[in-house]
Image (spheres, rainbow, N blue to C red):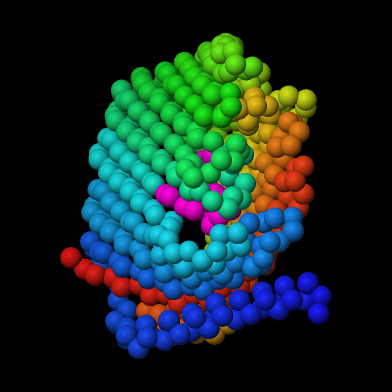
Amino acid sequence: MTARHRQQRTSRRRIGVALTVTAILGAPLLIAGSTVAQDVPNPSLKLSYGLSANADDNLALDPVSRGTSTYIDNRVGLAYQSETRVSMLKVDAGGVFRLSDLPQRGRDASFDDRSFRFSYDREGDTSRLTVRGAYNKSDIAFFDPLSLAADRNLPIDQGDLVTGRRGDRISYNAGIRLQTGIGRPLGFNLAADRYDRTYSGTNDPRNFDTRRTNLSFQTVVRPDPRLNLNFTVSQDDYASDNFENTDRRSRRATAGVGYDLDPSTQLTASLGYTRIVTDRTFQNVRGSEEKSGLNGSLGLTREMQNGTFGVLVTHDLSVDRKSFTEVLFSRSMDLPTGTLALSIGPNFQGGGPSLVGSINYGQELALGSISAFASREVNQDRNAESNREVTRVQVNLQRPLNALTGIGVGYDYISVASDVTGRDSSRGRINLTVTRSLTEDWQLLGGYSHIYSDRELEGTAKSNSVFVTLKRGLTFAF
């Protein structure tokens, strides 16, 4: 028997053991019974539990697999929700107790994927308040960067697509939005955001800490129902603990105007000034660079019978202190059983135009539902000060097979293409999931995932994994 055949037999044995353990541990939970399904009360407290057995033939996504990884996750979550006529409060927390057996790490027991999320929305007659916060601590070996694909507001850095074997990735983000004077002659808008990402227990130079802070304040004057004038000042701070210890401060001041040409058409324009100061260390010498220039925009939006159409032209400085111009055409529409929002156009930056935009689509079908999100943007590598193109894709198709069983197919993809050698990276995943309702509250899921990874100068890697999950949720009224 060859070494390859022995490895395949070992992999199959480990997968079989993982699935058997799931069946053994899940059996007592099925005997516990279920509660009668009912409408979600308000306020409510939901307790969720899931038991999952997993087997992956190349969890670390090495060009040549070092062996099969098996792990059992016990996931617990607690979520509170309260809604009134003018406010909405959501708080949830969770984590995973994991038993794992990984190549080069051996057997281990840990509490991972510790998360906390908070959101609060309140709306008055002339004001609106939104507060958001989130925390997550994950083992690098189990962190899923493809979870970032569906949210354009979450930044993607070089370290996110690097798969490590040891260490933790910790992320914090918080934001607040306050609008006052809505519909009044004078109003004020305040926005503040903070995003931190830190690493511990790893010495990979690609995994370095980053911090981002965004502040903006806007005054809005409405001398006429058809006319509004605004003045905005903002500051964007970025700091990283890479080998250059990059610190960057971007400040902008902008004056804008909005005018309703008719009840369904609005014209907007703005003109301002941008100043960017970058401090970094090069060859043990700390230096500072500064760039300033004009920013501006011109946009037209028109309400149509089944949605809106718009065009927006923007001009500004990027973090590499070069000017860029972007033109976006947008269209949103209501479909008979869904929605579609599309934006597309050229971005003139660097060596030539690049196609950017996004699409968000959701549709109820005769035999299921489909949702799709894709975006492509040109931004800058904040450390190398170079252009890069970031692409995100997420597609999900759900179809019921009968009253109790359904099938789902999903595809996730992230690509970061840089004009700096060695920084291109992409990762994609296709997964198949079968869901079976056992009782009113219990669900059994099983599935398969295939992941493809390509990192410039490192090569390609693939992994195949299977999982079986048993989960349940209990909702309590106050």
Say whether residue 243 is visible. yes
For the image shown, how many numbered marks are present on the structure? 0
Of the 4 image quadrants, the one containing the C terminus is bottom left
287 left or right of 136 in image: right
Asked if 44 appears above or below 454 in the picture, the reply is below
Say whether residue 374 is visible. no
- Indicate the position of residue 127 as horizontal and vertical percent values: 28, 35
Most distant residue in the right direction: 2
- Indicate the position of residue 147 as horizontal and vertical percent values: 54, 53
Q: Which residues are magenta?
A: 136-155
Question: Quick check: is 145 in the magenta stretch?
Answer: yes
Given residues 331 and 131, the one toward you in this image is 131
Asked if 229 appears above or below 438 in the picture, the reply is above
Most distant residue in the bottom direction: 31
Q: Residue at x 26, y 55 (%)?
A: 83
Q: Residue at x 71, y 25 (%)?
A: 349
Question: Residue 329 falls in which quadrant of the image?
Answer: top right
Q: Residue at x 45, y 77 (%)?
A: 470
Most frequent secondary structure within the magenta stretch: loop
- Indicate the position of residue 338 as horizontal and vertical percent values: 55, 60
Question: Residue 171 falls in which quadrant of the image?
Answer: top left
Question: Residue 133 falls in which quadrant of the image?
Answer: top left
